[in-house]
Image: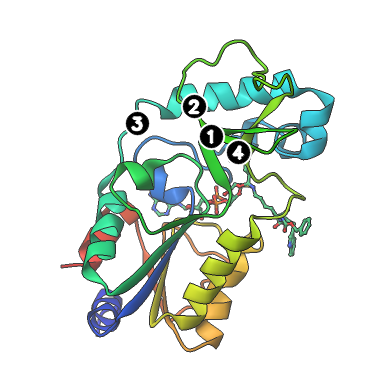
Amino acid sequence: MPEIDRARKALAAARRVVALTGAGVSAESGVPTFRGEGGLWRNFRAEELATPEAFARDPRLVWEWYDWRRQKIAPLPPNPGHHALAAMERRFGEFLLVTQNVDGLHRAAGSAKLAELHGNIWFTRCTKEGTLRENRAVPLSPLPPRCSCGALLRPHIVWFGEALDPGVLQSAVDACRAADVVIVAGTSSVVYPAAGLAALAKEAGAFVIEINIEETPASGMVDVHLSGRSGELLPGLLE
Ligand code: BJW
């Protein structure tokens, strides 16, 4: 049986479904990925921009980078991959979309059962009070922005070396442990703890489907690897 049919068959029999997404799912909307050709880390050094140390050293530089990314993402629409995942939420009895993406495009496509593991670029967090506020201003001015309490605001993003929100991570772990099918789409599967979720699900008995334009460290353990673009393959899974 062709791989896509094996994946469709598993999904057709599933009640509890989890989708785990990465930057590749937003690539067809025009959002740059992190690794690989054209990826952000080809032109920017992660440790100079995406660490708490970088922010402590030069908050303005870090904010300029995020402001540039916000300006790039703001006009971009969700693509058919995002829409297919929103449709899955309506189709399956239990569904959780676990995303590493911070661009907000899943929400824009209508997904509501969403665990944003690495935060959201459209929210700021007060470095003193921890208060979260949605802020869609593009460009942001002045940089770096400040809270009404006077403290610096930071992007609501999980940087390297920082812990993920324990509640958000636990919801992802619980859903993966209980899932009948897990779809891992558009992620290089190298950043932990997100990269460990597919193996966790597999060990707990889930059927794991990977969608990617290339092989990843997870490809050897999944039940089906579908090679291609998520904007084409995710809608194809529902046919
Ligand atoms: C397509 C496509 C198309 C393209 N269709 N596919 C265990 C082992 C080793 C290291 C660690 C470990 N545990 C923790 C670590 C350290 C670290 C880590 O994992 N490092 C590794 C890189 C080595 N992890 C952390 O630091 C995490 N924190 C943590 O563990 O804390 C522990 C702690 C506990 C208690 C107290 C204190 C600490 C935090 C990780 C945060 C990651 N943050 C980033 C940056 C955010 C900045 C920002 O957005 O501004 O999140 S890193 C960056 O990578 C971003 C992404 O969410 C993340 C994942 O990338 P993703 O989504 O997979 O994208 P790419 O670009 O890598 O891949 C795209 C894929 O799409 C490719 O495969 C393409 O082929 C594919 N593709 N087009 C389908 N059309």
The residue at which mark 2 appears reads as 135
The one nearer the camera, 198 or 120, is: 120
Q: Residue at x 71, y 35 (%)?
A: 129
Q: Secondary structure at mark 2?
A: loop
Could you tell me how far apart the alpha carbons at marks 2 and 1 are, in whole angstroms? 6 Å
As drawn, which residue projects farthest toward the left?
239
Q: Nearer the viewer, mark 1 or mark 3?
A: 1
Residue 189 visible somewhere in the drawing:
no
For marks 3 and 4 on the same chain, the one whose residue lies earlier in the sequence: 3
The residue at which mark 3 appears reads as 76
Residue 91 position by quadrant: bottom left
For marks 2 and 3 on the same chain, the one whose residue lies earlier in the sequence: 3
Q: Nearer the viewer, mark 2 or mark 3?
A: 2
Percent of width and height locating residue 224? 39, 77
Residue contact between numbered discs 2 and 1, judged by CB atoms under 8 Å = yes
Residue contact between numbered discs 2 and 4, judged by CB atoms under 8 Å = no
For marks 2 and 1 on the same chain, the one whose residue lies earlier in the sequence: 1
Could you tell me how far apart the alpha carbons at marks 2 and 4 are, in whole angstroms? 11 Å
Quarter of the image containing the N terminus?
A: bottom left
Mark 1 residue type? Phe
Q: Secondary structure at mark 4?
A: strand
Could you tell me how far apart the alpha carbons at marks 3 and 4 are, in whole angstroms? 20 Å
Left or right: 81, with 65 as reference point: left
Residue 45 visible somewhere in the drawing:
yes
Mark 2 residue type? Asn
The residue at which mark 4 appears reads as 156
Percent of width and height locating residue 60? 72, 18
**Disc marking residue 123:** 1
